[in-house]
């Protein structure tokens, strides 16, 4: 493509790119029509940017269609060889990439036919997905990222025949590059495999395979997908001699090791430093990995090139669990025991990995539905899926142990309990559940406390037949959007005369709680100025401050407190704003509430304190902050749960360690009650003061009228004489020449301020806050625990 060289070309290209960034279609059309021929495809002389690539980077999807209609070529490249499609994929601009791939709608393959008039408008061409940049990288290299936008871009690129086995000039394979972050990009890796990526793809210089990269990232799903498509499991790197088992053990990824062994991986292998997977698992401190490796053939006794065994490495790192498992492995390695032969473990692990496949196969053969199949069908099923078949004599023993009326119980076989040692079953690697202690004779069981949900009505209609007080009038910006907007406000109040020629919009009402959630400051401000209390409650007795704290909205909480919101108000469950702030997991918000008088020891209806809600949100920094601020650790709920019990149920190990350490360091209260002790004297009943009550009723001491008299005087009928007396008082009337505009411009945040606010929001809530599936810390914690239970 031509590069701007002359002064005129450079100036026109620079002007064109600026118009693209501003979205000025009219000026773009004039430049292309009256400027240098083919100006729209010119490269600017610095980085080689074109109009189309600039629009792709700026996420101007509507402008891309317009540029294509003006004749922009979708495959024009910059000085680094990057096409506009690559730039759009790099930034995750899905709509821009769609416009480049489908310029004519849903028919990107359409071409210009013979006989068409050359004077017709330009026919848009679809972007070519096989282009490579100067480094030899195709578009998929730019789609490898952990966001949903990049995942969608990768789907589009694969749909339009992007090269899935692309190797750059350094010999690096695109699928290996994707598998390096497979734990974050599982869907992209799976779809690349489904679209033709080689399961045995590797980097040419190092011989590093995609399986090694996926094992290092810890994604069992991608590891399984690679092996199912024929990935070689025991390949070593050229110089480092590292295998996929080394990478999985280095990260402590137990499930990846299980999948690798199910496909025939050998664990007793050594890298160039003499380290086996056992050495690396001990360095990581993963007890289950050390136990599994020792049981599946990895010798824990050899020393590496530095003269250290796996046990010495674990001891130097202080990993007690790993030391324990390595020591056990040293004792059992090489010794034959009952039902722990290598062929048994190979068959068992193979069947565990393919449990669903075998279950579906045998269920189709089980016509009666008794969970049994014929012996011949059972053996044929194992052979058909490629199981490592034992010798005939060993197979007979397995069939006899699972015999049920002349047939084989395949469900019992898949559990492995009849032919595999109990210590080698997968159930032996599951965390042990704590046994419940029996209740003593004298102890009473936990009482179930009824917990009614208290609600309140919306209240009566306001004066004039308006909705209840909790529904406030929504603040609407009444202006001519063609003249003014958030980036072009009026320079002075009189400039905006839109109210004189525009129809006034109809009134709209919204719940003040929802206005707080959606950060409608102007709506809430209008309501407060009309007398709505700042601590007004909704159906569940929640105030706007509680809702702001629930959403982790520090700015709204600060604004409401400045307006006089009560930081110690409580809802129907006696949750205070501090409870909600701790549930949101935001340390800065909690600190702000405490600095403004929030009660650190306020208890909810079930007796929970704010630190218990912080533990449930699984935020170690917040829990430590509350402990440093003096939160009491000995409080218990009405269910007799203390902070340690809640940390064990909701928090992770980091939270539990913090809470347990502080809980153990706090001195426990001693029981000083003794039998036969003297009873304390009953409290004296306060004497009533009739005279004082009389003073309150009459208001004689203070000089003020009682409320009853004051009410009577306030409702006294008007008098003409009093009005005439007031008029004759000679009050001087001042002339007011001030002009009040018919409508006042509402100050709106500019686009730059909105972008800055979004950046701050991402920093506080992570990048996931922009997606629909975002969850607050407590909800995310519960969601992850439910998923882990479903997986088990």
Image (cartoon, rainbow, N blue to C red):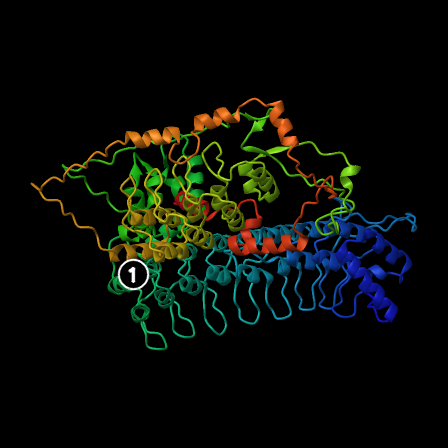
Q: Residue at x 49, y 48 (%)?
A: 552
Residue 354 visible in the displayed image: no
For residue 449, side relative to residue 792 (left or right)? left
For residue 361, side relative to residue 341 (left or right)? right
Q: Mark 1 points at which residue?
A: 321
Q: Position of residue 46 (x, y in %)?
A: 76, 70
Q: Which of 723 and 251 is in front in this view?
A: 723
Q: Which residue is drawn at 84% across and 52% down?
A: 26
Q: Where is residue 558 in the image (x, y as percent from the top left)?
A: 51, 50
Secondary element under disc 1, as helix, strand or loop, is: helix
Q: Quadrant of the N terminus?
A: bottom right
Q: What is the quadrant of residue 278 in the picture?
A: bottom left
Q: Which of 504 and 421 is in front in this view?
A: 504
For residue 672, side relative to residue 395 (left or right)? left
Q: Nearer the viewer, residue 239 or 646?
A: 646
Q: In which quarter of the image is the C terminus?
A: top left
Q: Where is residue 791 in the image (x, y as percent from the top left)?
A: 41, 45
Instruction: Count the labels in the image.
Output: 1
**Circle 1: is it few (<14), some (14-19), or many (20+) Cα within 10 Å?**
some
For residue 415, side relative to residue 169 (left or right)? left
Q: Where is residue 124 in the image (x, y as percent from the top left)?
A: 81, 51
Q: Which of 229 and 25 is in front in this view?
A: 25
Farthest residue to the bottom: give it: 306
Farthest residue to the top: give it: 717
Residue 658 visible in the displayed image: yes
Above-or-below relation of 80 to 630: below
């Amino acid at each position: 493509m031509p590069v701007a060289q002359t002064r005129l070309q450079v100036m026109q290209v620079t002007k064109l790119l600026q118009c693209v960034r501003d979205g000025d279609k009219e000026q773009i059309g004039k430049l292309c029509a009256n400027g240098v021929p083919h100006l729209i495809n010119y490269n600017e002389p610095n980085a080689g940017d074109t109009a189309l690539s600039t629009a792709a980077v700026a996420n101007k999807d509507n402008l891309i269609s317009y540029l294509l209609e003006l004749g922009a070529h979708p495959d024009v490249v910059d000085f680094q060889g990057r096409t506009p499609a690559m730039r759009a994929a790099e930034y995750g601009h899905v709509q821009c990439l769609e416009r480049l791939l489908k310029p004519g709608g849903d028919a990107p393959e359409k071409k210009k036919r013979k006989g068409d008039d050359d004077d017709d408008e330009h026919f848009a061409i679809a972007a070519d997905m096989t282009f490579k940049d100067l480094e030899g990288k195709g578009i998929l290299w730019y789609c490898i990222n952990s966001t949903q936008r990049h995942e969608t871009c990768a789907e589009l690129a694969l749909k339009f025949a992007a090269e899935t086995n692309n190797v750059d000039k350094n010999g690096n394979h695109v699928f290996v590059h994707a598998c390096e972050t497979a734990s974050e990009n599982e869907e992209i890796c799976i779809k690349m495999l489904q679209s033709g990526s080689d399961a045995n793809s590797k980097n040419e210089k190092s011989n590093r395979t995609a399986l090694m990269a996926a094992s290092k990232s810890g994604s069992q799903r991608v590891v399984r997908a690679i092996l199912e498509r024929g990935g070689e499991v025991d390949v070593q790197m050229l110089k480092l001699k590292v295998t996929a088992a080394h990478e999985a053990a280095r990260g402590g990824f137990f499930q990846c090791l299980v999948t690798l062994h199910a496909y025939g991986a050998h664990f007793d292998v050594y890298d160039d430093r003499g380290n086996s997977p056992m050495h690396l698992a001990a360095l990581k401190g993963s007890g289950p990995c050390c136990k599994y490796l020792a049981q599946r053939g990895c010798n824990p006794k050899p020393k590496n090139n530095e003269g250290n065994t796996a046990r010495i490495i674990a001891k130097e790192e202080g990993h007690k669990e790993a030391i324990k498992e390595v020591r056990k492995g040293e004792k059992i390695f090489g010794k034959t025991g009952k039902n722990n032969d290598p062929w048994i473990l190979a068959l068992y692990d193979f069947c565990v990995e393919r449990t669903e496949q075998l279950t579906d196969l045998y269920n189709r053969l089980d016509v009666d539905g008794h969970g049994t199949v014929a012996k011949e069908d059972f053996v044929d099923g194992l052979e058909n899926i490629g199981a490592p078949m034992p010798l005939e004599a060993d197979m007979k023993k397995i069939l006899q142990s699972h015999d049920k009326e002349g047939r084989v119980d395949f469900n019992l076989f898949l559990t492995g309990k009849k032919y595999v040692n109990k210590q080698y079953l997968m159930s032996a690697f599951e965390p042990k559940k704590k046994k419940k202690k029996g209740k003593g004779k004298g102890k009473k069981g936990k009482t179930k406390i009824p917990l009614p949900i208290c609600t309140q009505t919306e209240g009566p209609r306001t004066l004039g037949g308006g909705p209840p007080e909790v529904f406030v009038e929504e603040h609407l910006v009444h202006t001519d959007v063609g003249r003014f907007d958030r980036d072009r406000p009026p320079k002075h109040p009189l400039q905006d005369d839109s109210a004189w020629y525009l129809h006034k919009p109809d009134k709209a009402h919204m719940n003040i709680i929802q206005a707080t959630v959606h950060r409608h400051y102007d709506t809430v401000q209008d309501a407060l100025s009309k007398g709505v209390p700042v601590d007004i409650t909704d159906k569940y007795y929640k105030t706007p401050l509680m809702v702001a704290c629930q959403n982790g909205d520090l700015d709204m909480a600060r604004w409401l407190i400045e307006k006089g919101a009560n930081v110690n108000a409580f809802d129907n469950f006696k949750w205070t704003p501090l409870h909600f702030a701790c549930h949101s997991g935001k340390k800065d918000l909690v600190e702000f509430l405490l600095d403004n008088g929030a009660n650190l020891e306020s208890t909810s209806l079930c007796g929970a304190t704010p630190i218990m809600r912080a533990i449930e949100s699984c935020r170690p920094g917040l829990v430590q902050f509350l402990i440093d601020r003096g939160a009491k650790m000995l409080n218990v709920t009405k269910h007799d749960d203390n902070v340690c019990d809640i940390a064990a149920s909701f928090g992770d190990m980091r939270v539990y360690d913090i809470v347990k350490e502080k809980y153990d360091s706090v001195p426990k209260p001693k029981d000083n009650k003794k039998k036969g002790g003297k009873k304390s004297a009953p409290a004296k009943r306060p004497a009533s003061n009739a005279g004082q009550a009389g003073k309150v009723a009459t208001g004689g001491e203070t000089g003020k009228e009682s409320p009853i008299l004051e009410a009577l005087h306030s409702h006294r009928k008007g008098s003409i004489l009093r009005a005439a007396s007031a008029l004759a008082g000679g009050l001087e009337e001042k002339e007011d020449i001030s002009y009040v505009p018919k409508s006042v411009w509402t100050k709106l945040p500019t686009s730059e301020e909105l972008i800055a606010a979004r950046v701050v929001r991402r920093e506080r809530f992570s990048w996931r806050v922009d997606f629909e599936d975002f969850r607050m810390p407590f909800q995310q914690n519960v969601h992850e625990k439910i998923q882990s239970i479903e997986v088990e």
